Image (cartoon, rainbow, N blue to C red):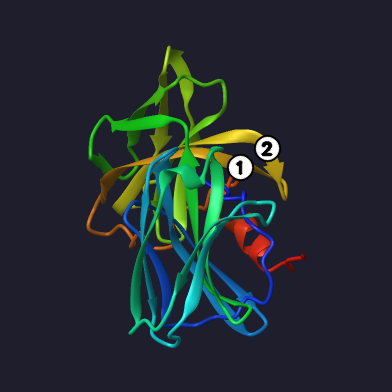
């Protein structure tokens, strides 16, 4: 599912620091995404997933700096929460209270140091509770995976289901079959076999850089796709990336834009 984590920020002077990372206590694996910018490479491997009003436990590893600012920003460059860290020995922990965010949507944590951004981590703050229920956790290559999604409260917004592994994904739109229940089938290519992460997401009507903003996301473990025969090729690179959405494409370009006071 190329669901875009679009609701992010216009940040300036992004400077990479390989030793600086942001980790959250609740994340969902999404499409691995890399971006080359001014000779540097930036990677996003997962996204935070929390309910509205829920606290967020954050760990920052920043071995190259002793002091920094950890902030949460919205798509309009507003700083919603800030936490200063002084004289860390390489790792710092922080807790963002649930009241820091009052509107569901996609946000980003960022580590600032002397006006530069050392690391970013997208996060979806949701007003929906999503339960993803696969028909099985083992599916043969060339087979079909049936997935049911329970959504509370019910919504008229699009519900999408995704299987993802590294930079490859399969996606499908879920159809509403009864109140709060959405279902879909994902057809697995014969050439694909491996362990995939399964998740569902809800997009809002807000369009940012041509992509819908996520206001709900939930994952449900892994799906094992078994090979058809010993002669089948390896899974890597054989699943076509989905076209409709892509987590983080819009995010990265927004992150590289200049912040204005």
In terms of sequence position, does the residue under pointer 1 or pointer 2 come before the other?
A: 2
Disc 1, SS: strand
CA separation in Å, label 1 and label 2: 6 Å
Q: List x then y, in percent, for residue 52.
A: 45, 37
Disc 2, SS: strand
Which residue is found at the position 33% from the left and 77% from the top?
Answer: 91
Dots 1, 2 in contact, CB < 8 A: yes
> In the drawing, does residue 41 fall left or right of residue 257?
left
Bin the neighbour count of mark 2 within 10 Å (Cα to Cα): few under 14, some 14-19, many 20 and up: some
Pick whichever, 79 or 62, lies toward us.
79
Q: Is residue 166 above or below residue 52?
A: below
- Can the viewer see residue 3 in this picture? no
> In the drawing, does residue 84 fall left or right of residue 252?
left
Which residue is found at the position 68% from the left and 37% from the top?
Answer: 206
Q: What residue does disc 1 label?
A: 213
Q: List x then y, in percent, for residue 246.
A: 56, 51
Q: Tell me the number on the disc at residue 161.
A: none
Which residue is found at the position 47% from the left and 18% from the top?
Answer: 176
Q: List x then y, in percent, for residue 167.
A: 46, 60
Q: What residue does disc 2 label?
A: 206
- Can the viewer see residue 30 in this picture? yes
């Amino acid at each position: 599912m190329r669901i875009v984590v679009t609701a992010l920020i216009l940040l300036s002077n992004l400077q990479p620091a390989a030793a600086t990372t942001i980790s959250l206590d609740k994340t969902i694996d999404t499409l691995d995404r890399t971006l080359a910018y001014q000779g540097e490479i930036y990677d996003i491997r997962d996204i935070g997933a929390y309910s509205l009003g829920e606290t967020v436990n954050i760990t920052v590893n920043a071995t190259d700096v002793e002091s920094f600012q950890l902030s949460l920003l919205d798509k309009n460059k507003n700083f919603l929460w800030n936490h200063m860290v002084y004289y860390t020995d390489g790792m710092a922990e922080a807790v963002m209270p649930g009241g820091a965010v009052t509107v569901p949507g996609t946000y980003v944590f960022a580590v600032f140091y002397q006006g530069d951004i050392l690391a970013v981590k997208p996060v979806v703050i949701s007003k929906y509770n999503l339960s993803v229920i696969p028909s099985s956790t083992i599916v043969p290559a060339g087979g079909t995976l049936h997935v049911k999604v329970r959504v509370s409260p019910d919504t008229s917004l699009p519900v999408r289901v995704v299987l993802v592994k590294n930079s490859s994904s399969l996606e499908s739109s879920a159809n509403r079959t009864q109140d709060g229940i959405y279902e879909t089938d994902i057809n697995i290519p014969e050439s694909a076999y491996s362990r995939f992460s399964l998740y569902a997401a809800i997009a809002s009507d807000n369009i940012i850089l041509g992509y819908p903003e996520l206001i709900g996301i939930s994952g449900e473990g892994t799906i094992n796709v078994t090979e058809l025969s010993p002669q089948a090729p390896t899974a890597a690179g054989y699943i076509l990336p989905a076209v409709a959405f892509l987590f983080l494409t819009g995010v990265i370009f927004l992150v590289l834009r200049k912040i204005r006071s």
